[in-house]
Image: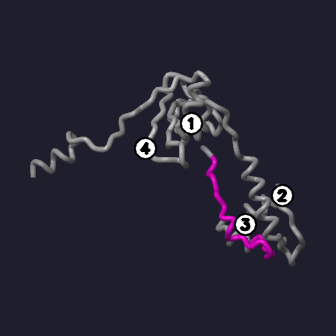
Amino acid sequence: MAKKKHNHKYNLIKAKRTYSVAQLAETLRIHPRTVQGWIRQGLPIIGKDGNSYLMLGEDIKQFLRDRRQKQKRPLKTGEFYCAKCRQPRKSLPNRLEVIITDKRLGKTSRQAFIKGNCEVCYTSLTLFSSDKKAQEWQEKTLPLTEHKEVLLGNENSSYNIDTERL
């Protein structure tokens, strides 16, 4: 079973405030044992208030930022991030496809979706990108096929047929 990904809301933590384990857990809506685990992993504490540790808000924010940064996986040209494998993976070469939309990204680029299938687990992969990035992939001799049709509607769909019968 894959681990559940948590995106902690840093803006709920005030930088110049001190937090106890219970207060931090309540603020981030997590279990106090999670905070205790973070302390064991290196979350800096500034003191003890009775039986509870005290932590500075800025230290908590920095700890969570560093922790998130360690989990990032940079992608090279031709790689996707496979959510099932939780690793950067290449796609099966015969399954690569690029879909370029009419949406603009900045002044010169257009939005593109590069799609493929993981070479290990065959999961569907999608990379949000630009048409320039897709060209870069083509130059690296990756066989991308361009998908130009966009499904806007189908007159032969069952919904349209049922409404005509009424």
Q: Residue 45: x percent and y percent?
A: 87, 67
Q: Secondary structure at mark 4?
A: strand
Classed neighbour count for the residue bearing mark 2: other residues with Cα under 10 Å, few (<14), some (14–19), many (≥20): few
Of labels 2 and 1, the one closer to you: 1
Q: Residue at x 15, y 48 (%)?
A: 162
Q: What residue is shown with label 4?
A: 102
Residue type at tag 3 = Pro
Earlier sequence position, callout 1 versus callout 4:
4
- Spatial CA distance of label 3 from label 2 is 13 Å
- Spatial CA distance of label 2 from label 1 is 45 Å
Of labels 3 and 4, the one closer to you: 4
Q: Secondary structure at mark 2?
A: helix
- Spatial CA distance of label 3 from label 4 is 48 Å
Q: What residue is shown with label 3?
A: 32
Q: Secondary structure at mark 3?
A: helix
Q: Which mark is residue 132?
A: 1
Q: Residue 6: x percent and y percent?
A: 64, 56
Earlier sequence position, callout 1 versus callout 3:
3
Q: Residue furthest left?
A: 166
Q: Secondary structure at mark 1?
A: helix
